[in-house]
Image (cartoon, rainbow, N blue to C red):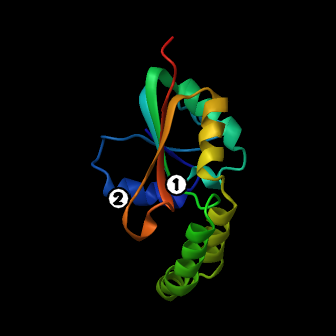
Amino acid sequence: VGLDASAGMLARAERRLPKGKVTLVHGDATDPAAAGVEGPFDGVMMAYGIRNVPDRDACLENILALLRPGGRVAFHEYSVADSVVQKALWNAVCFGVIAPSGIALTGVVDIWEYLRRSVNEFDGVKAFCARLERAGFVGVEERPTDGWQAHILHTFIGRRPAE
């Protein structure tokens, strides 16, 4: 099941996914049940999304409820709040590469500023791990990527406790 609040993103996913393999649902991650999404699932993955959710805590609580006992969660997300160096690198890349390239390709300006700002304002690694634990996840870990995005792009993993 793929859940997204953006009809445009769902349309792109539909074009790229094998027919009949994934059910795509238009809905809000803070209330997946309202969109008809019911678990239990073995795993839930969200990429570049949790920082865009207005009520992150409600979203995490609902994801936990969708998982079977022992089910896993993974969030792939930018986080620079814990490091002045990584925040400076992120902003330099945004101003020097991402925004100019994005504007040239799309003609849209505001989304690139939103991207830069939303990453700057998102939880630091420690704060997001603590948020996951407060929501009830166990075995919470963070795994950074390498390359220029090292310590900027992270994968956060955890599990629903086995009951």
Total marks in image: 2
Image coordinates of residue 107 in percent, x first then y, are: 55, 86
Image coordinates of residue 27 in percent, x first then y, are: 59, 44
Q: Secondary structure at mark 2?
A: helix
Image coordinates of residue 4 in percent, x first then y, are: 54, 49
Please report the residue visible at 52 percent of the width from the left and 56 percent of the height from the top: 48
Question: Which residue, as the protein is rendered here, is positioned at the far left?
Answer: 18
In the foreground, 51 or 96: 96
Nearer to us of marks 1 and 2 is 1
Residue 155 higher or lower than 140, as above or below:
below
Gap between marks 1 and 2 measured at Cα: 24 Å
In the foreground, 118 or 127: 127
Residue, disc 1:
77
Which badge, 1 or 2, is on the more N-terminal residue?
Answer: 2
In the foreground, 51 or 158: 158
Inspect this view and state whether residue 33 appears. no
Q: Is residue 71 left or right of residue 80?
A: left
Residue, disc 2:
15
Dot 2 surroundings within 10 Å: few (below 14), some, or many (20 or more)? few
Please state which amino acid type lies under the numbered disc 1.
Answer: Glu
